[in-house]
Image (tube, coloured by chain):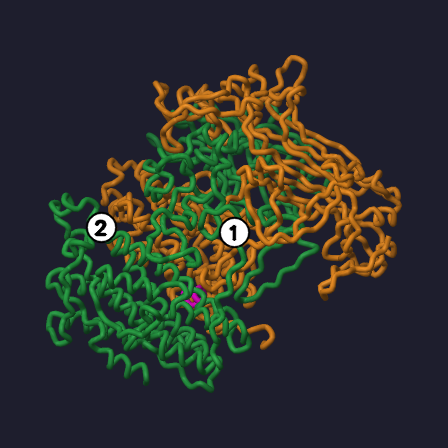
Chain colours: A green, B orange
Amino acid sequence: MKVKPVNQSAKSGPASPAYPQPVLGNPAATLMESGVGNCFPGLEFDLRQLDVRFFPGLVFAFPGITQNGPDGTQGAQLVYVNTGDDPIFLEDRKWIHDLANTLNGEQGGALGGGQWYLHWVEQGGNRIELYDNIIWQNTVTKTPYEGEIAWWIIRLIQIDPDPDFADLTIALTQRDENGQPSGHPVVLKGKRRAYLDDEGMIPDVYRPGELTASMCSPWTHDFRDCACQYWASNHPDVALGEVQDPQQLADHTDDLDAAQAVTFLDWMRRRSDPARDIAAQPTIELARPMRYDPYEINLHWEELDFVLQGQETSGTFKPDREDLNEDPYPDLAALIHDLSHNLARFEFSLAMEYLYAFFSLRAPDDVSPEQERDWPGLTNDLRAARQLILSVAISEMTHLRWVNQTLWTLHDMHPGYGPYLPVVAPAPGVPGEDDEIRPSQLRIATQKVIGEFVEVERPGGDLDTEYAKMVHYMREHPGQFPPGLDQLAVRIDSDGLNHYQKFRDVLRILDPYSGCPDVYLRPLTEAAPDDPRAQPALALLDAIVAHLRSGYSAEAATAQSNAARLASQDEITTARDLMHQLYDAAEVLARDHDLGVPFFAHAGQYEAASRG
Amino acid sequence: MMHDCCHSGNDHAPWCGRDASEGRLLGLFFDPPMAIARVGRSKEPMPAYTWVVDENPHRGVQTMIQPAPTLVPVSEHANGHHPWRLTVEHPDHITFKDHKGRVKPVAPFFELWARVQFKTGEVVAFPVTEPLLKTFGASLQTLEFTVTAANRKAEARTGHAECAAIARKVFKADHYKPHHLDAISPHTEDQTPLVRPDAPLPLGKVVTFLPNHDNWSCQTRLDQIRLRFTPGKGDAFGPPEAVQAVASPLQPGDFEPAMPEYGRIHKMTRPENRILSSDTPWLGYAFDADNKPKWPTPMDSYDGARVGNARSWGLIDDTCDLLIEARLAARGHLHQAKARAFAGPPDFAPDKRPMYSITDELEDRELPPAELDFDKTPTQMLDLFRRIFETASLMNLDQRRAWALGGNASILGAQDKDDPDWDGDMSPHVGPKSMRRADAPYADLTPDYTPGQGDTRVPVSGEDDRLPYTMVVQQVHARMADSPVLRAYMARKPGRVRELVRPPFASIKELPRRPDMTKPARVPVGKHADAPIPPTLIDGEPLRYRDPRNQKDQTYDMRMPPFMRHSMGVPLTITRRQYDLLMAWLDKLETDPAWRADPVREDHA
């Protein structure tokens, strides 16, 4: 686009795309980058209105069809012809002179009588008709496309950068009472209009008010009534509530926690409704009764909340408290050692602990009608708790990959630390309560165990500060890292908050059943390593670890060869397929035999491989 | 008047220290050439803020807003009235509403600049100030502004000019009072104007400011001539009849038949805003009155359209779009500059950027295909995926999916939209199997994360399930906002990305003449590859652009962006420009190891 800020600049780099900068005094919400570009009809203005004047001298409309179906008047209707009020005809170009002569001559005169429609457009030798051909009793009839399709065809015309090159031909015809094109076409040669002038403005042939003429009236009508819901950037569908969430547990959290509400709320909900803090609904029909009504919103739209970082709020957050006062690593070697000897292993161990807990929960399908009658909501609660725990377990597996990615990146950049060795093995212990290392162990999802998971993931806890420390070091020593690498540690750190919230939610969801654990827990015991029933699962786990190791090794070399890229793709894909099989095997083992997979049974073998 | 610049940095503006009198005036322009204003009822305008990357590791790599230097008008005579002089304040905190809960309007400034050409041929942009005008033999009195604002919503539907609302103000640059954009309807003697001159529609105001020479800096020119447009309050206006009415209890897009109505009763306008004329075609307008299709679409986009006989309540609002023109006579030449503003709704999630913005759409229409560039392309793609996350993070995917799949069933004539098999073996699935395991190869991660969900259109959930699909989209896309994750994923699974991203429509040159006979152009997979790559096959066919005339291309499936709506109600895609660049980038990531390598820090290059 031709918009060029003249008094501001912003640096861009491979890890940090530049943000467009508004002029002094303007909020970013004044920028065209803040407005939505997909329009039916839009929020700030309707970009479809540009196409109303796509061909110089002509003005079109794009009526669709009514509920009664096509009536033959739909499509691209010519509204009027006027060369007098179109500044483009002041430009000195041959095609413009020729077009003006045509429009001011006999053909243009013809367009002044009766209703004309766009019949076809031709560009690059390709002619596209705005009619659908239907064969009926060996006769071809033409059905005009409705305005929506006609508009899209116009929208797909491209502009040639040479302003002297007339590369677009169009034809207009009238229609008979059956909607069939009739009479001699008027054929015009020209060019699609440029929608920005040399200064980066939509040209003034679009009169004030034209670009918003098709917007809803009043604007609040669209803000509430539009079925599109496609503007979540300016008009959220869902948001988290403010920190004072009614579902927040009294589990000695306090305002200093980086805690936030965990419930998605329907942003358009009526703020005076008793259900205003109830979770958002999965369908529009269910949500509708709790939302502002038509008309009502005209006087109540200012009750809608602003949303920052996904959370409803009255304003920007206060400056962050400084919590990076941990001692950073003494040097890069210490950081690499921490990654390979602690963090990668913690992630592996936690993933297995969480998976074990997941399989210890009864599956929703296991709940009998009688149990559901006695414990209303049990099925849904189990489904919710399982999804939350599984998502955290998958996330930990992803972290394992990211720690390895950080390692192979650092070994590649600093060969003096030796070759990269994939670390896919559990740690003997993981951070527990009061930041003490406790043994890695496989336990069923009792409230006590879930509570310990909360503690592991608690913001400010040992695991959380490990990554914050790493980010701090990376930012303090940028020369030791490629740009953007700190984003991996940032992502793991921020996921930790997410895990913490999810486990708190699991605690809350399962709390009503905590007096009768049999209701929601399987009587799971860890299978003996040599139990034949566990062997298929263990074999799958062994294979997964092996393929992950091969995949990470290949990926570490991906910048050297295409063969390595292909190998990494195959290895990781295989590992993921095996994970699906392991899921099924573990579920059968738990459901049919009350046995849990002894995920740490071959820890020594994985550890040996990780040490090379 | 010459000043010493007090800016201490090295990034002085190009004109700083230059003498404009040594050049000639080529022309004027506004910066920005277009800006969005946003309505609000507060008297306090929204402070300035910019987008920055959040540095807090606990919150992840994401965009946040940061308070920016804010221009605050100070009454010259300390009486709260004009003229005003601007000062700069540096807020450390922004609130979006005032103490009465009223939304602060976004009121953009427009700076006036001059292009000056020196005898070397160099052209430099200078801020237009009173001394600069004098340099070129002009003055504030010879600089005139014309601001024309209009709301044509009612006119567009009725086809009657007397239903438009237009304001036009002409004033000199030193006329510092607020110029209220009080709109009236154009009409002739025998027509009834919708907006009468004695009760105009307040579309906002424009103001210019006294120069401020304090703390003169090339980064903060407060002696530069600026206009500020403050939009209307966001109010609805109507005729005296538009008092209160029964609202349709149905969901958006649904109609209530002309039968008794059971919705809630609401007031629709403030009493003081019932100032429009009753005797116009707008009150009582009905989009379906003659069964003729109409433009603009959607046709039911006005208050009153959804109930009974679909008659309009005659409401319009105080939003508008406007043209600002500056005209300057200097040494026998007339110089002009123009800018546009649009008054729209508040940006209620100001730290989230649209994945498909106005800029994206304009660039897609106006610019040639983006060039593949080793340094720039990864950054452009990262920016795109960050914006995708930002939009997706506030989306209720569960609702969108249920809505879109229900719509597919309607389009394709399914008897039971919840029958998991109604779409047979279509691929991608467009029924309840969409985004489920059976929707391979498209569905992959989502079924992993949602093991408890079956092949249902509406998610199986209770009050504690939250929104299962919504949770997944947030988790998956957050990580794509990180540079190393994005690059590694794209490099590892280029074929999957090609399958998963919905292709945009083909251009006119690439569409088949007959949609049922031949197919649109192929996506040029491999065009930028340095080695042969396996073809991406969809149902055994090579990947192709889509055709707006093809019914299947109008149905919703899980391809990205999933279940979202594009202009004119078809499935959303990223722009053609973005898509082609993404495909080109995948070619390189798949076949050129150098593109997969970690970027090199600039100071180590």
Secondary structure of the residue carrying numbered label 1: loop
Does residue B110 appear in this view?
yes
Q: Is residue B486 magenta?
A: yes
Residue marked by disc 2: A512
Q: Is residue A101 visible?
A: no
Q: Nearer the viewer, mark 2 or mark 1?
A: 2
Q: Residue B257's spot in the image, x, y percent? A: 35, 22
Query: Residue A29 location, x and y as percent?
Result: 58, 47
Magenta-drawn segment? B485-490
Residues marked 2 and 1, same chain = no
Q: Which of the 4 quarters of the picture holds residue A398?
A: bottom left
**Residue A11 x/y as whole percent:** 61, 63
**What residue is pinned by disc 1?**
B351
* Chain letter for mark 1: B
- Left/right placement of residue B491 relative to residue A541 reads right
**Magenta stretch, overall SS:** helix
Q: Quadrant of the C terminus of chain A?
A: bottom left
- Give amino acid for label 2: Pro
Say which of B275 and B373 sits in front.
Answer: B275
Residue A128 has which mark?
A: none
